[in-house]
Amino acid sequence: MSNFKFYINDGDGIIKENLFGSTQTTDHTPKPRNGTQVAEALIENIYVTQKGSYKDLTEKWDITNVGSELIFTSKAEKAYKDAQFKVNEKENRAEIKGEMFLKNLGNVGVTGKKEVNILSVIGTAVTNGKLDVTFDDGTKVTKTITVAKGDTKETIAAKISTAFQNLTDWDVTNTAGTAKVEYKAKAEASDKDVKVTIINK
């Protein structure tokens, strides 16, 4: 059984096109490996023999096999819709054709949930003034709101919600009669470290 070329494109910037030669056993006399042995040898090549060359791939993917099938499992909770692992037919031999071709792309990865962050306003305004409210999800956005003496926490929450209505990537709401401001992500994604601060000017 001869060498063959295989191609990996994880759909997220990593592309590998390598020659694989461990298609024979060498215990006594050379014998062709079966599909399971070839899959196991490929994994050994990726994790041991040439692990330095595949470090960027194995940092993002767990690679295992079930029989002759190679299974690529994303370590991140996201979908890689264009991921590919294939052996071009012109580079292959009949002995392994069909065992090395991609059978399917697997299940779509988890894309996350719409993150929700809650700001709870406490207390009543004791004087007329202004408050700087800063929302920070990695990008800071500051809004200045005007408060009047006697404004309740519910009134202040409503004013904060109104001020942030055009916030990029987040829907901002306040249920009437409550002192809570909800910042809900518009898209499903990984969790972000979100901070909301209020400073009395």
Image: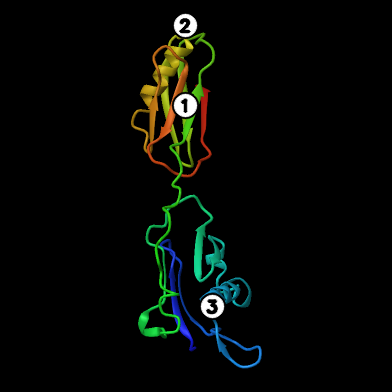
Q: Which numbered tag is attached to residue 51?
A: none
Kind of residue at badge 3: Val
Point out residue 101 in the picture as x, y percentages from the top left corner. Answer: 41, 73
The answer to whether the residues at label 3 and label 1 have Cβ atoms under 8 Å apart is: no
In the displayed structure image, the side of residue 184 where residue 29 appears, left or right? right
Relative image position of residue 73 (x, y in whole percent): 51, 59
Residue depth check, mark 3 versus mark 1: number of the one nearer the observer: 3
Q: Which residue is mark 3?
A: 38
- Residue that label 1 marks: 133
> CA separation, marks 2 and 3?
76 Å
**What residue is shown with label 2?**
150
Identify residue type, mark 1.
Answer: Val
Furthest residue toward top:
150
Q: Quadrant of residue 170?
A: top left
Q: Amino acid at mark 2?
A: Gly
Compared across the picture, whether 93 is left or right of 76 comes to left
Picture layout, residue 5 above or below residue 63: below
Q: Residue at x 41, y 28 (%)?
A: 143
- Towards the viewer: 85 or 29: 29
- Depth check, mark 2 against mark 3: the one in front is 3
Residue at horizontal 44 percent and vertical 52 percent from the top: 109
Q: Secondary structure at mark 3?
A: helix
The answer to whether 153 appears left or right of 41 in the picture is: left
